[in-house]
Image (cartoon, rainbow, N blue to C red):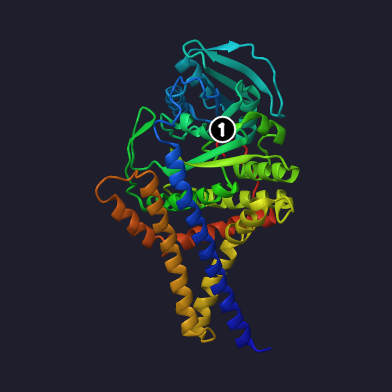
Amino acid sequence: MNWQVVADAAAWFYLAYFAVLGVGSFLLHACSLLEVPRQLEAGLPELLPRPHSGYEPPVSVIVPAYAETTRVTASVHALLRLEYPEFEVIVVNDGSSAGTLEALIREFSLVRFPGADRRQIETRHVHGVYRSSNYPNLRVLDKDGGGKADASNAGINAARYPLVCIVEPDSILERSSLRRAVMPFLSERNTIAAGSCVRVADGCDVRNGFVEGVGLPRKILPMAQVVEYLRSFLFGRLGWAPMNSVPIVSGAFGVFRKESLVAAGGYRQDTPGEDTELVMRLHRLNRLSGRPYRIAFLVSPVCWKAAPASPGVLRDQRMRWQRGLGETLVRNRELLFHRRGGAAGWLMFPFMVMFELLGPVIELSGYLFMIVGFALGFVSAAAFWSFLLLVVSLGMLLSISALLLEEISCHNYRRPGNLFALVTMAIVENFGYHQLVLWWRLQGLFQWATRRRPVSGTANG
């Protein structure tokens, strides 16, 4: 066997892989550039539904909580101040023994209420329903611990309204978040879900549960995640919206049509990526049955969350996400290249397999092969430097393109020096941080493939 021929073929494979990734990412960026002006035009003040206009459907806001004694009370206070004519807040205490229920009872003057059992999705036992004496639109469910997915399903069962909004206790919404998030349901009756961007709250001025001033983190890990989140949401998800192929609605903040969730069976409790799996299942069930539907993604409103600041927490998060992605794609593999799969089955699903699921394996092996091959002489200098230039320039281009989309769509980072800091991080993160995240994702992929890690059993996931 001519090993040099094999080495040359491998080098061309890695170059072709990154070239295809670049073309696919460029096309997603182009779709995002077309989608942003359309959404901005649709969101003009004269077209945006105003509070008490009478056209907004009522919404049930569901907050699954576990051991959230301090954070959940502050979160509920903020949610109760959202600008929306008719909504209810349902907090689901998922078996917490850390005083969560007691704190809610004290803070909101809760009293036991004989709620009707409207179980449409199987969940762990609900011990009691509480209603606030001061806030008539606030209810609290106390149930056995079953995890975030089970707590969300219990909230869906208890929801009285046709739209449900799933919010994590540490999510920080904008006052107009609900009003904007229901717009796709008003403009198109086949809409069954709507997600939006998630941004890093570190460095922001948060007062009374709302972001009053946008800033940047001082620590390097959260700062790198600011750029990463912009890249992931502003064309990694927004770019799929025109094709009705949005792959994920974040568990931090998403609005769904209740009847669609119930028909799909709610969130699965046996996967670490329940939010990703649910959306992919909605695509599969509706595509394969031929039912018209739409899953929307909005550039605004923005949901803010604190980013992991320690390497250990960030590593566990990325490994969990990768395990969840693997399970999601395998469970819904019938969508792949199905004759009714549409763009979701013929474009989005293969893209997720090749560049999200298998990306860590191919990218890291590409780095290793090119470096070792160049050092030992079986990879030419031209191939090595072409690979390095392609990889680095692609990463920088994608990050800077995401910054451009942010400036066009939201222009949140207005403080002096913010844009320079973001551009600098968009360059620097390609030298170390990106490779470290790939390594963690590779470990998560290995854990999923070998079933090494059990699913967490708490609502905070």
Which residue sits at x=52%, y=65%? 23
Query: Which quadrant would the N terminus be assigned to in this image?
Result: bottom right
Quarter-of-image position of residue 430: bottom left
Q: Position of residue 9 (x, y in %)?
A: 61, 80
389 and 124: which is toward the camera: 389
Asked if one can make out residue 364 in the rendered structure from this viewpoint, the answer is no
Please, is residue 37 above or below residue 426 in the view? above
Identify the amino acid type marked 1. Phe
Q: Which residue was labeled with disc 1?
A: 185
In the depicted structure, whether residue 262 falls above or below residue 354: above
Residue 7 or 165: which is nearer the viewer?
A: 165
Q: Residue furthest left?
A: 416
Q: Is residue 212 visible?
A: yes
Q: Residue furthest toward the bottom?
A: 2
Residue at image point 58% right, 47% down: 246
Measured from the top left, where is residue 163 in percent x and y? 59, 28
Q: Position of residue 8 (x, y in %)?
A: 58, 83
Residue 74 percent across, percent down from the top left: 42, 26
- The residue depicted at 54 percent of the width and 86 percent of the height is 378
Secondary element under disc 1, as helix, strand or loop, is: helix
Please name the residue shown 37% across and 48% down the image: 408
Q: Is residue 291 left or right of residue 413?
A: right
> Number of marks in the image?
1
Which quarter of the figure is the C terminus placed in? Answer: top right
Question: Residue 187 sits in which quadrant?
Answer: top right
